[in-house]
């Protein structure tokens, strides 16, 4: 039985194909921009990308297409077909929400803001960014008004990145995390079982040697290199998919502290696997692909944290490291484990360990809510940031670059995005708890490099559904309960205390 049978849905999918093709082209251009493009190409590339997204919006809002989707929605549909209608109605709603003038203003403001942010960060001078951020806060509020919301404006922004997520959900999640995380962190700092620093952070490596490590790990994971996937290098590692049979990751090589390269690769593999294990019958339809940013991040965090930061993984990878990195002969399995699990009060979110990571997100969430509600001005932010981070981590930034200016997201106008990182981290631990229950000897499999049953579990529970169901429904359907921070706290307690 084919997944799509209703004639109206088949007509919708036929029309949708050109929207899909534009998305495909946009992905290729985006990937090329990060991986291959010479620096000066940026001006023409930005215009090309801008025009393509306008074209995509035109096709999405073409009356004939909108009517077709509306028509199909009143038919008797199977669950796949209902998924198609849900995803397209949401796309249409979002595309329709913003008037062209607003889109232009947003785009101009954010390109200027991004340049100002880079300059401000380099010169460590917040005042260069302040008025841009102020404008973005006002625009974010307007975006929320255009999108509409039931309870509060921040809901509209959250929903843009994570379908169905509300401010109340996030408040509820963080209220269960903040205190326990602070307590666990304090205890780890006191008992010193997990070091703050490790000598492996200083060891230098040759890029070619580290490439061999990454490729050996990817092959063991079952990444179909060359067949359906690639690995390249970019400043900020990412995953992109052009379709179910062309999924690409990137990684980074600093030349020292090899865990940055290794765990980036492992992380991106998790994103890639989600796309590679989609149901091929959904190919080129609106329901293929990861359902939301939060669920996507749970897949990458699962491989990075639950697999990659485990003792079993340290045992698995020891021979691969020893074969390729000469300095490794001085270190044992316990060193590898401690090295990937150092715990300290990092001021930089992207360098934070899994214990303090969510505290960084809690801070951004608090500030974003105040910004969107118009309760604070941009000029108040640096001081609030420093006070709050000191409360959370006990350390104060010495520069703006280590504090308020560290993340690029606000300059892009992406407000309401950070909580999806927390959802990913938390849900990854929850999946970890289920997989230990459902797959016998989970850590034994990791240690022996037998990843097939793990891939299969994730395919069965998450990947094969694509976007048929909204994130909350998917989680409930596959695991019988909602996302619960308690699992994450349990995981940290077991591991660190
Ligand atoms: Mg990620």
Image (cartoon, rainbow, N blue to C red):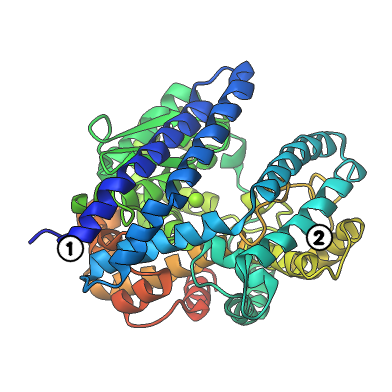
Q: Mark 1: which secondary structure?
A: loop
Residue 458, how many percent across, how many down? 28, 61
Q: Which residue is mark 1?
A: 6
Tell me which corner region of the image, top left, top right, bottom left or bottom right, holds residue 307: bottom left
Q: Is residue 26 above or below residue 486?
A: above
Is 482 on the left or on the right of 68, as rendered? right
Between 213 and 140, the one nearer to me in the picture: 140
Residue 327 appears in the figure:
no
Quadrant containing the C terminus is bottom right
Answer whether residue 393 is visible to the viewer in this image.
Answer: yes
Please give the name of the residue rendered at 57% of the width and 17% of the height, measured from the top-left corner: 38
Q: Which residue is mark 2?
A: 395
- First in sequence: mark 2 or mark 1? 1
Mark sitting on residue 346: none
Find out if the beta carbon at label 2 lies less than 8 Å from the nearest ligand 1 atom: no
139 left or right of 312 in image? right
Q: Is residue 353 above or below residue 210?
A: below
Q: Would you place residue 275 above or below residue 387 in this image?
A: above
Q: In the depicted view, which residue is nearer to us: 461 or 64?
A: 64
**Which residue shows up at 50% across the image and 62% down it?**
93
Q: Toward the viewer: 376 or 492?
A: 376
- The residue located at (87%, 57%) in the rendering is 378
């Amino acid at each position: 039985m084919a997944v799509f049978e209703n004639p109206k849905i088949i007509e919708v999918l036929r029309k949708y194909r050109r929207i899909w093709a534009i998305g495909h082209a946009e992905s290729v251009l985006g990937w090329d921009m990060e991986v291959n493009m010479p620096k000066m190409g940026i001006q023409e590339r930005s215009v090309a990308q801008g025009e393509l997204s306008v074209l995509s919006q035109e096709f999405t809002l073409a009356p004939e297409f909108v009517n077709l989707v509306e028509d199909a929605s009143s038919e008797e549909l199977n669950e796949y077909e209902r998924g198609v209608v849900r995803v397209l109605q949401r796309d249409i709603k979002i595309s329709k929400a913003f008037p062209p003038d607003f889109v232009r203003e947003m785009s101009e403001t954010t390109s200027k803001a991004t340049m100002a942010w880079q300059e401000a960060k380099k010169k460590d001078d917040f005042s260069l960014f302040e008025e841009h951020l102020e404008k973005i806060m006002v625009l974010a509020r307007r975006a929320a008004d255009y999108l509409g919301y039931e309870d509060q404006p921040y809901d509209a922004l959250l929903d843009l990145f994570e379908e169905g997520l509300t401010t109340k959900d996030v408040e509820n999640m963080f209220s269960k995390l903040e205190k326990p995380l602070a307590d666990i962190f304090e205890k780890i700092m006191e008992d010193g079982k997990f070091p703050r620093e490790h000598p492996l952070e200083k060891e230098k490596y040759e890029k070619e040697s580290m490439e061999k490590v990454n490729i050996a790990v990817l092959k063991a994971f079952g990444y179909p290199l060359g067949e359906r996937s690639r690995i390249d290098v970019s400043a900020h590692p990412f995953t992109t998919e052009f379709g179910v049979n062309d999924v690409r990751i990137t990684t980074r090589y600093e030349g020292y502290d090899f865990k940055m390269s290794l765990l980036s690769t492992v992380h991106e593999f998790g994103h890639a696997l989600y796309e590679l294990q989609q149901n091929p019958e959904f190919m080129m339809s609106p329901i293929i692909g990861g359902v939301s940013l939060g669920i996507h991040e749970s897949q990458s965090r699962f491989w990075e944290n639950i697999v990659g930061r485990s003792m079993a993984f340290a045992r698995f990878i020891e021979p691969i490291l020893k074969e390729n990195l000469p300095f490794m002969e001085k270190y044992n399995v316990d060193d590898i484990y401690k090295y990937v699990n150092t715990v300290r009060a990092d001021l930089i979110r992207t360098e934070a360990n899994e214990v303090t990571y969510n505290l960084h997100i809690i801070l951004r969430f608090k500030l974003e809510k105040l910004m969107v509600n118009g309760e604070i001005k941009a000029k108040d932010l640096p001081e609030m940031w420093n006070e709050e981070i000191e409360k959370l981590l006990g350390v104060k930034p010495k520069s703006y670059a280590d504090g308020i200016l560290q993340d690029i997201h606000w300059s892009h106008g992406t407000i309401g995005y950070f909580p999806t990182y927390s959802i990913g981290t938390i849900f990854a631990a929850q999946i970890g708890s289920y997989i230990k229950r459902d797959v016998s000897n989970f850590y034994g499999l990791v240690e022996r490099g037998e990843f097939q049953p793990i891939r299969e579990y994730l395919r069965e529970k998450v990947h094969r559904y694509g976007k048929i169901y909204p994130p909350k429904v998917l989680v409930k359907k596959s695991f019988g309960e909602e996302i619960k921070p308690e699992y994450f706290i349990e995981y940290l307690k077991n591991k660190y205390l």
